[in-house]
Image (tube, rainbow, N blue to C red):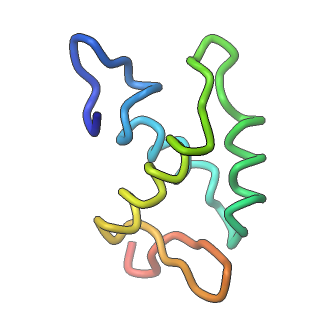
Amino acid sequence: MILPGKHLKQDRALLGIGSEILATLDQEQTVSELWVRVQEGRDESANPLSFDWFVLSLSFLFAIGAVEYDRGVLSVESGR
């Protein structure tokens, strides 16, 4: 679920989706704005991404300290 493996492609693993999120999070954005931008930037050959899986990946990034959430706005952790 977190890492890609034999039965889980990178575009479905939380780490793979998290990397797409971090690549898209170049400026402060709301969750809704980020969701739209990730959807637009996703490779057409990738598996469809549900909002639940997107939020789970965001939660993973927050848990490892990669993103910050303050007053409704997401940003990349300032120490990175």
For the view shown, which residue lies furthest in the left direction? 6
The one of 9 and 24 positioned closer to us in this rendering: 9
Q: Is residue 29 left or right of residue 18?
A: right
For residue 42, above or below residue 25: above
For the view shown, which residue lies furthest in the bottom direction? 71
Quadrant placement of the C terminus: bottom left
Q: Where in the figure is residue 59, as x and y percent of width and height?
A: 42, 60
For residue 53, above or below residue 77: above
Q: Who's the residue at 25% across and 33% down the image?
A: 3
Q: Who's the residue at 58% across and 72% down the image?
A: 75
Q: Who's the residue at 32% across and 67% down the image?
A: 63
Q: Is residue 30 left or right of residue 23?
A: right
The quarter of the displayed image where residue 64 is located: bottom left
The quarter of the displayed image where residue 60 is located: bottom left
Q: Where in the figure is residue 51, as x and y percent of width and height?
A: 62, 43
Q: Who's the residue at 65% across and 22% down the image?
A: 43
Q: Where in the figure is residue 4, as x and y percent of width and height?
A: 28, 26
Quadrant placement of the N terminus: top left
Q: Is residue 67 left or right of residue 23?
A: left
